[in-house]
Image: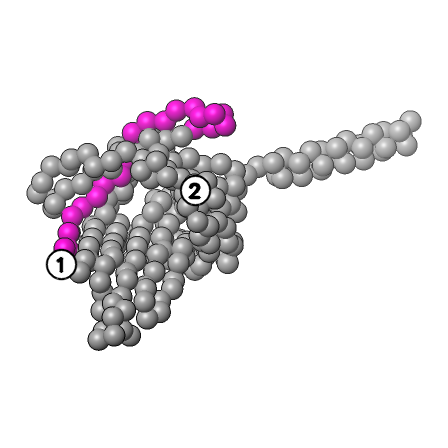
Amino acid sequence: MRLANIFTTVLLGIIILFSSCDTDTLEPNSSRLGFDFFPLEKGLFRTYDVEDIQYSVLSIDTLRYQLREQVVDSFLNQEDDYTYIIHRFSRVNENQSWGLDSVWTARQTPRQAISTENNVSFIKLIFPVNENAAWDGNALNVNQGDEYVIQDLFNPKTYKEKEVRTVTVLQEDEEDLLIKDERKEIFAEHIGLAEKTFIKLEFCDDSDCFGQKVIERGRALRLVLIDYGKE
C-alpha cells in the first residue's frame, strides 16, 4: 500500500511538472516577439513633424507641416483577424486645425505587421524581431521585390522625455553617380512608427554635370515623432 501511495505521488508530480511546462510554452511573450513595436488599438495616435522636399529640373519645393495618425476603428477581415482603420490628418503648424489627409489600414498576423498605404500593402516588420532578419517588403503588392532588413535591435531612444526600445528597418541604402535611394523606418516599443526617412533622388547625367551629384528630380521626406498617446 505504501509503495502504491509513493508511486501515485510521483505520478502526480510528473503530471503537474509537464502541465506547467506546457502552460509556459503556450504563453506568448509579446515583448520578446516584437508585437509591441507595431501596436494597434482604437484610440492610439502619433503626431510627427514632417519635412517634404520635392525636386524637379525647374524648382525645389519644400513643405513643412505636422502629421497625425490615429486608429479610429477596426473590422474583422477574411483571415478572421482584425484590420485597423487609420485616419491621417495634417496641418501647417500647431496653431491650425487638423484636416483629413488620407485613410490607411494596418493589421498584424503572428508573423507580419502590414500597412496598406494608398491601397498598396507593405510588410513593415516580421516576427519575431531578430537582428539582420530580412524579407521582401513588397511581397503583398505588385511592385518589384524590395529587401527590408532589421538593424539596431532594441536600441534605446528618447521620445517625449521617455526612453524606449526601438527597432530600425533598413529598406534601402544605395548611392552612386546617378541615384540616391535611402529609406528606413524606426519603430518604438508600445508606440509604433517613430521616425521615417524616404529619399529618392536622380542626379544629372549630362556631360557638364555628370559625377557632381546635381539633383535633377526626386523627393526627400523625413518624419520625426513629437507626440503620442491614446484618446
Query: Does the CB distance between marks 1 and 2 fall below 8 Å?
Result: no
Could you tell whether 80 is left or right of 174 in the image?
A: right
Residue 124, compared with residue 131, is above or below; it is above
Quarter of the image with the N terminus in it: top right
Disc 1 and disc 2: Cα gap in Å?
32 Å
In the image, residue 122 lies in the stretch drawn in magenta: no
Question: Which portion, as a residue range, is magenta?
Answer: 59-82
- Residue beneath disc 2: 142
Q: Residues within 10 Å of mark 1 (few under 14, many from 20)?
A: few
Residue at 50% over, 54% down: 134
Q: Residues within 10 Å of mark 2 (few under 14, many from 20)?
A: few
Residue 226, compared with residue 19, is above or below; it is below
Q: Quadrant of residue 181?
A: bottom left
Residue at 50% over, 50% down: 135
Image disc number at residue 23: none
- Residue beneath disc 1: 59
Residue at 25% over, 70% down: 206
Amino acid, disc 2: Val
Residue 87, compared with residue 215, is above or below; it is above
In the image, residue 71 lies in the stretch drawn in magenta: yes
Picture coordinates of residue 6, whole percent (x, y): 85, 33
Picture coordinates of residue 132, whole percent (x, y): 50, 58
Label 1's element?
loop
Residue at 31% over, 38% down: 118
The residue at the far left in this view is 95
